[in-house]
Amino acid sequence: MMRFFYVVLKLALQYSVRIFYPRFKTVNAPRQWYGRTIYVSNHAAAFMDPLVAAGMRRPIVFFMTRSDVFTPITRPILWTAHMLPIYRQHDGVDTKDKNAAVFDQCARILSFGRNLLIFGEGFTDDVFIRRLKPLKKGAVRIGFHTLEKINWKKKIYIAAVGVNYSDPNEMRSDCLVSTSKKICLNDYKELYLENPNKAITELTKIVEDLLKTQITHVEDKQWSEFHEEVMMLTRKGINALHSDHSVPLEKRWHYSQKLALWLNERTSDENEKLIPLKEKVADYFSALKKNKIDENHIHEMAVTGKINRTTNLMHLALLFPFMLFGMVHCAIPYLLVKRFVEKSFKRRVFWGSVKLLMGMIAIGLLNIPVIFVIYAFVYPSYLIAIGYYLLIGFFGLAAYMWFRHLKRFQQKGIAQQKDLTDWVARRAALIKEVQTEIPVA
């Protein structure tokens, strides 16, 4: 059975996550609710990862969370959300004994057919980078521990889950979740009984390699910025602000993987020859930033010969009445949550997920009285009142998009006053060189 808060989150996230990530896709998504499977995920975006990997996929999962968030106040809430504490050495507690008890609880969960979701890297980078850090051995260790507890009588599986963002903190960007085929840990019984440490190490490496195929993984993070900038120029990848959204998300994801794989497979000497191009690309984007020019405007000039504000103006007109409703219902909680999160969380990587979760809760709770107001003063039908209440999220989205189009309308107005001819030529020459030097580009 699913616990109460887990059910609420599971339902609410289907609504909220798809507002935050309108282009959302799952690849090879499991169809079963149960399955005695340990899902090992990358940890690219702090709190956003469990919201997406657990909330947007069918399997019922219990997931492990750092122990310091379990306080006397939060523990009951986290328990009902299927969260389990994991103790780390710097938490200042006897991690061995406490984690042994947690491992036993994990074994019980798996033995009853439920699933676990574990973020194998153990921590998130301060700056979002498309790469996988070395996996911890805990997930595989829990799997074999469970098999020992149940005397190998049931099958325990492990699978990799790759969460891919165009930018986890950018609202209205992309998210793709890919799940690998399952590995049956029982198949490694003989190896484990002969040498447990060897079995755990080998299986962890297998899962790590499998997880790399489910994400975009740039092996050397010194090339991650170049990888991102090439995607921005070609617009074929999954960059949040510079992508061709007429191309399906899965196809753009595969492009980003191919580009990363091409960089990963090159020798040091080959990459040395690529450095001049890398510097040219970096200089181009640095110059754009210095001159306060948007690369999207250069692209539009290159494709159409002009910068058009008509579409933005139409959106401003069509969204205006809905924006007013959104401001009434969502402006205050949005601004309060935004201010609280950006002041309380120094690491920007936490902002998107915490804003999403807190905003969802704050807007949902503060607008509950609207149901009764509509029933009492507009029309005596709870069905209509609840229907209106469910539209509040879309009103908030309309307000967000209205101000976003207003900003773009203003930026395009400034860009129209500039002569971008030289920038268009520079960009065209750069793209030609990129396509010559990089076969997959």
Image (tube, grey):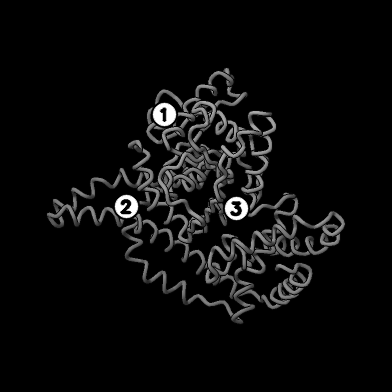
Q: Which mark is residue 74?
A: 1
Residue to which mark 2 is pinned: 329
Tell me the SS state at disc 2: helix
Dot in front, 3 or 2: 3
Is residue 98 shown left or right of residue 191? left
Name the foreground residue: 77 vs 121: 121
Mark 3 surroundings: few (<14), some (14-19) or many (≥20) residues within 10 A? many
Is residue 65 shown left or right of residue 233? left
* Image location of residue 245, percent across then percent down: 53, 68
295 up-or-down from 101: above or below? below
Please indicate, yes or no, whether residue 409 appears anywhere in the rendered image: yes
State how far apart marks 3 and 1 are (Cα).
33 Å
* Image location of residue 260, percent across then percent down: 70, 57
State how far apart marks 1 and 2 are (Cα).
28 Å
Name the foreground residue: 333 vs 110: 110
Kindly indicate the quadrant of the structure image that contains residue 196. top right
User: How many discs appear?
Assistant: 3
State how far apart marks 3 and 2 are (Cα).
39 Å
Quick one: which residue is furthest to the right in this view?
Answer: 269
Quarter of the rendering occupied by the C terminus: bottom right
Q: Which mark is residue 214?
A: 3
* Image location of residue 269, percent across then percent down: 87, 57
* Image location of residue 242, percent across then percent down: 60, 65
> Hey, what amino acid is under mark 3?
Gln
Tell me the SS state at disc 3: loop
Dot in front, 1 or 2: 1
- Residue drawn where x is 44% and y is 50% of the image: 56
